[in-house]
Amino acid sequence: MIKRLTIILLVFLSGLNLSAQNARFLGPLQGMNHRQKGYSYQGMDIYGDWLVSCQNKGIATIYKLSNDGFAKVSQFNLATFSKVNHANVISFGVEKYDANDPLPVLYVSQSHKKPYEGRKDLLFAERILPDMSGSTLLQTIFYDDKNNDFGYALQWVVDPKNQMLYGYGNTINNNDPANRHRIIKFRLPKLSEGDQVVLKSEEALENYLIEDVSGFSFNPIGQGLYILDDMLYMPTGLGKEDALSILYVWDLKNKTMKEINLQSCTTGELEDMSSYKGHFYIQGQDGLFVLTDEK
């Protein structure tokens, strides 16, 4: 079933202007055991015509995109598959393990309240095998949070254009009225730096609270992250009146926030997003949506 609904949407992709936009439901995703508790959809990113969709524990499904929709290609457990790998955000980087690999390195945010092999909030750099049948772990990135910068869960997102790495998360948790939201910025480590990389607070290029630098107040549940042209996109919400689906857009250069209500054009819990051929694609628990200027 195709749903076409209209929304007034601020769009930052080239070629799209501020105007009445449509959201198109492309269809349900085909995750492993996705209707069972514990297999929720989480991180998603797009490279070329390939979309990688992750589920809790680190299950990956690869789809081939086209103008008509998407088709499932493969499904497998990531090398870091674990009950404590939430795979909350995924981002393609810029390096390829082998020049002939169809996909660059995939960065996977663990983002779980419990540690993975003794450390918490890790970022895994995984190589998806050339036949897309599995992955291997190339590098583990860890932030040595000795200043207690982050609370419940730290999320990571790659800015491939500028080859930067951003961390985003709560200072406490989203249920605490004193909670704030921190951004920390590092140079994206190269694979040649080894299989274990520790990031230290004194190495950060930026470290600030969104509320302090902008005066903007918000307290959503941390879900997806995506960076495009110096904008950090954060889809949030459960598609309910008491938890509206809001796309927050943080200007990484000018330190300003915009909020876009997606309640009327998407359904269910929103998880992560990316872009394909000039349009935003949003992964939710109900399936895949594309924000488009088509009438």
Image (spheres, rainbow, N blue to C red):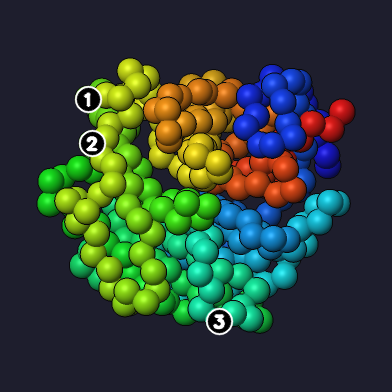
Could you tell me how far apart the alpha carbons at marks 2 and 1 are, in whole angstroms? 8 Å
Callout 1, which amino acid? Ala
Residue for point 60% across, 37% down: 268
Could you tell me how far apart the alpha carbons at marks 3 and 1 are, in whole angstroms? 46 Å
The reply, left or right, for residue 5 in relation to residue 210 is right
Mark found first going from the N terminus, 2 or 1: 2
The secondary structure type at the circle numbered 1 is: loop
Q: Residue 142 appears at what percent x and percent y?
A: 27, 62
Quadrant placement of the N terminus: top right
Q: Residue 50 appears at what percent x and percent y?
A: 69, 62
Q: Which residue was labeled with disc 3?
A: 98
Callout 3, which amino acid? Asp
In terms of image quadrants, where is residue 282? Answer: top right
The reply, left or right, for residue 67 in relation to residue 25 is right
The secondary structure type at the circle numbered 3 is: loop
Quadrant placement of the C terminus: top right
Q: Which residue was labeled with disc 2?
A: 172
